[in-house]
Amino acid sequence: MSSENASCLYTKKVAEGHDNCTAVQLSTFCRETEFGWVAGGRLHENKNNNNLSCYLLKDDNSVEDTLKLFFELESLGIKDDPYYHEDDQAMNIFKETIQFNNERYVVELPFRKNWKELSDNFSVAKQRFQNLWRRLQRDEILYSQYQETIQDYSYQGIIEKVKNTEANIHKLIYYLHHQAIKKEGRVTTSTRIVFDAASHQTNELSLNDCLWPGPNLNPNLLDVLIYFKLNRIAISSDIRQAFLQICLADKHKDAVRFLWTESNPSEKKITSLQIYRFNRIIFGVIASPFLLAATVKHHIEKYRKSHPITVRHLDSFMYVDDWITGQDTQEEELLISLHAENIMKEAGMEMRKWISNDTTLMSQWAAKGFDTYPVDTSVSLGSNKTKVLGLAWQTLDDCLTLDTKGLLEFISTKKNT
């Protein structure tokens, strides 16, 4: 069909009861637009109806392609790089530059381009921050949570104010856009700040454009879940603020700047802008999942001879910051968890939210001072429901469940997606 308007007539059968059908003519036109081919028309039998019906023509993608796109969007940037090869540049840079200072690992961003190709995007960051500020002015609770997170980051040394804000053409500078994401039902918090390293000015590169993503070092998700259910005793734990426990080299800290203000939300205008920068790696930078996984693997390798079983479990069943594993006896599981807790602490990483389907093991963890998963006092120990890599885990019954309540509620609204 050409890009010119085309007219067509077709007959549509409309059911009237079980057996009788009547033919209705629908005169339509088709036009190619920025969104693809659009068809519209009017029923011939209704002369008084001037409404014009429009439809969007879409390619008939297979279910396989649709699911593939869905999981790519849900993968948090973790996926196999088709251009990855054995001498991957990100891995080479990591091995050559990783250090251990002041009880924490220090890494560099794996730049694939010369840092001079990265433009200063201050104007874009300022415009987006003003949009964020208007949202915070309308939501006092959100502002309070936002400010609390910024203050906590500053107190922990995760971020710091940039003292010299003068332009420097000989310095790597990039500003991260950020926004709040609310997620109800989390144990730790319902609001978190997400930073965007893909923001850029027109015809300019973003920070993510300039970095090697690195190979996917995380284990196969299905393998982890299967092994998790093969053991009599299963455990789950995660690393507290995992990305933020790895320091960033000084020369790359100005590549992760962001804007904030001490202005009061009641003020119509922002009276002053502060520039902060991160001292740690953050999620939102394309190389961060690789840097976290590579750092953990680099660290645990030191203990392979002294604690081979624990290291094997940490190496094979740590997915990003979640450790999902198990054993058949309490003695084995307690020993592995004790070793894992100590090994990760040596890297400046705290294991938290320990939970198991075995109530005795959880009691033993509590006696050892572990940060166990909060349990509702109205129910027996171990009956908590938590999530294991996105699936609901009922620890009392030791089963994985799929909650369809939200899906059914959405379907009942009959909204088109």
Image: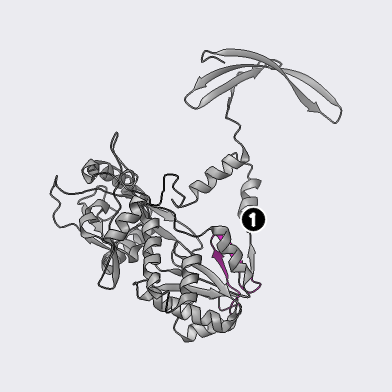
Work out which quarter of the rendered image holds the C terminus and state it. top right
The part of the image, by quadrant, that contains residue 5 is top right
- Residue occupying the far right of the picture: 19
Q: Seen in the image, is 102 located left or right of residue 90?
A: left
Residue at image location 49% in from the left, 78% down from the top: 336
> Residue 110: x percent and y percent?
30, 52
Q: Seen in the image, is 254 located left or right of residue 406?
A: left
Q: Which residue is mark 1?
A: 404
Q: Is residue 363 above or below residue 288?
A: below
Q: Is residue 210 shown in magenta?
A: no
* Span colored in magenta: 376-398
Residue 262 at least partly seen: no
> Residue 45: x percent and y percent?
71, 16
Residue 111 at least partly seen: yes
> Residue 119: x percent and y percent?
23, 41
Q: Seen in the image, is 227 located left or right of residue 212?
A: right
Work out which quarter of the rendered image holds the N terminus and state it. top right
Residue at image location 44% in from the left, 67% down from the top: 188
Q: Seen in the image, is 88 located left or right of residue 51?
A: left
Check disc 1 and report its element: helix, strand or loop. loop
Q: Is residue 397 shown in magenta?
A: yes
